[in-house]
Amino acid sequence: MKDSKKIRIALTKGRLEKDTVGLFEKAGYDVEQLKNKGRRLILSIPGTDIEVVLAKAADVITYVEHGVCDMGVVGKDTIDEHSGSFFEVCDLGFGRCRFALAGKKGENFYEGIGVKTIATKYPNVTRRFFESKGMDVDIVKIEGSVELAPLLGLSHGIVDIVETGTTLKENGLEVYEDVSFISARVIVNPVSMKLKKAAIEKLVEKMEHYKGE
Amino acid sequence: MKSYDLITPEGTRDLLYEECIARRNAEETLRGIFLAHGYSEVITPALEFYDVFNNKTRNIRQESMYKLTDEKGRLMALRPDSTLPIARIAATRLKGCALPLKLFYTQNIYRSNPKMSGRDDEITQSGIEIIGGERRRSDLEALCLAAQALDMFDSSEVRLEIGDNGFYKFLIKQLQIEDDEAIRVLIKNKNTPELKVLLEEYSGGEKEPAAKMLLGLPALFGAGEVFDKAEELFAFPELKERLAGLKQTYDALCELEKGERITVDLGLVNKADYYTGIIFRGYIEEYGQAVISGGRYDTLIGSFGGEELPAVGFAANINAIAAAQSNRVAVKKPDVLVYAKDGRLTDGIRRCRELAKSGVTAEFFDGEDINAAGQYAKERGIPRIETV
């Protein structure tokens, strides 16, 4: 059972975790445990009622939705792909990148009347994007390097996360169009927000204040 | 072909023993409260025509409904909501009856949730509807019953939260926004950063004040101080008037119930947009979603072709109440096991019936010999064996 005084926050393992821990450090929290976590998955910040949980991106959403974690830090990409009901209260500004439609360099994606095939790791984002354009597309879910799909002739294009575009360039691909912009967000379980308003607002304010620009 | 005969569909479950007791306790307690306040019970079919739920003013997502067809090929749905069928009844069979109608129900609703999300597709709800009453009186009565229902949760942290989507609807009208879904979702998710970006187009223009008020809605939640903040934010007299009305209800509710449990959220904007005024939710600490949800729906009954009747109601999630209590109930063991000797079968059954009538829980032993009866009584924890 959850301790009713504790605020449990789930961080997306990896880069977002590092950036968030950096933010906590700037805010003056004791992040010793978070930095030397070993293989532990649940950690505490001494001197506070904050408990930190480390999870995979999509799981952060699941834990927050079910209320076993009060808050989470997760990328907008994961929110867009998995959706769900929770409050999205703060844009932390780090982990910036974008979803883009890309394909072989120099080709006109929208040419012709045939149904296009799109390879992606993000079928929901892709479906919504083309639905908003009124376009029927075939979506193929790929798990690994999506860039392979158009190169091997499986798809006309891909929808994927683009940071610098280097991978695309090195494989003879280019961005046709931006789909949406991504950054790290703070999400909050609606019931937690209501029951632990003061503590959660204080933490969110702190994060907002120290996030920098 | 693969057979699925050993499992239940995802989102459904078998309830056994203590779970059943907790479920029935919750149902009966609420039923008792509603009956004691003069409400009449209704039961609507689990199977309804799809059209009951699918209409511009009855916005239930079609993906979330379980659908099937009848022999004429007409689309049917397993009811995803109980308020809509009751509005249908109010507009048809109960048309012309003395008002207000005070109805209650305890029945299942069915929602198709995304798989593996751990949510129930079959939820037992118990709730009330007050149809045709004076608004402020009905609102307060409904809220007090919701507070009583919430008292059933033995939780350290309980909140009954009230809001009113009239503020939101008024401001959207001021901004002349046709398709407000994107804005509604941002307000619902308290996503102020993105809302700010979306409303930027109004800055500097004559609609800027309204946009500013809209941007302020998500943060207007908490205890009574919210009213002061809202009073400061709202510049339109229509909003001030609505706010004063809500404050009256809030104050009355705080006086009647434990005041520290009552909160306000003016950023509550439900998906079911048949709500036309006050909206409320009940929360408990152990459950990640609202366990009570309700509100005012003044145009719904009119949308079924009847006279427009003001109405308010709420539903409590019995699954959640029962889950919170199931470790605190126990199955009652029989007081006595009746064993009939060979040739005394009818006497044995008769004795069992006598005992049961006298208030003793008596189980008839269906096995053949007395040793087996002893073994069975031991395993079941039955304290006494009576041999006939």
Image: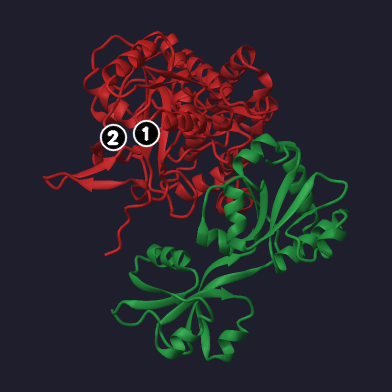
Chain colours: A green, B red
Q: Where B131 falls versus A109 (above or below)?
A: above
Task: Quadrant for residue A199, please give it.
Answer: top right
**Residue drawn at 53 percent across, 17 percent down:** B144
**Residue A157, x across and y down, in percent:** 44, 80
Q: The disc numbered 1 marks a residue on which chain?
A: B
**Residue B190, x across and y down, in percent:** 60, 45
User: Disc 1 marks which amino acid?
Assistant: Asn
Quarter of the figure that contains the C terminus of chain B: top left
Residue assigned mark 2:
B46
Task: Quadrant for residue B221, please give it.
Answer: top right
Of marks 1 and 2, which one's residue comes earlier in the chain?
2
Q: Residues within 10 Å of mark 2 (few under 14, many from 20)?
A: some
Residues under numbered marks 1 and 2 in contact, where contact means CB atoms less than 8 Å apart: yes
Q: Where B164 falls versus B348 (above or below)?
A: below
Q: CA distance from mark 1 to mark 2?
A: 8 Å
Left/right of residue A171 with respect to residue B36 in the rendered view:
right
Q: Where B187 falls versus B382 (above or below)?
A: below
Regarding residue B292, the answer to whether it shows in the image is no
Residue situated in front as seen by the camera: B225 or B111: B111
**Residue drawn at 41 percent across, 76 percent down:** A118
Residue situated in front as seen by the camera: B299 or B356: B356
Q: The disc numbered 2 marks a residue on which chain?
A: B
Q: Residues within 10 Å of mark 1 (few under 14, many from 20)?
A: many
**Residue B204, x across and y down, in percent:** 61, 49
Regarding residue B93, the answer to whether it shows in the image is yes
User: Disc 2 marks which amino acid?
Assistant: Ala
Residue assigned mark 1:
B108
Dot 2 falls on a residue whose secondary structure is loop
Residue situated in front as seen by the camera: B124 or B207: B124
**Residue drawn at 68 percent across, 41 percent down:** A1
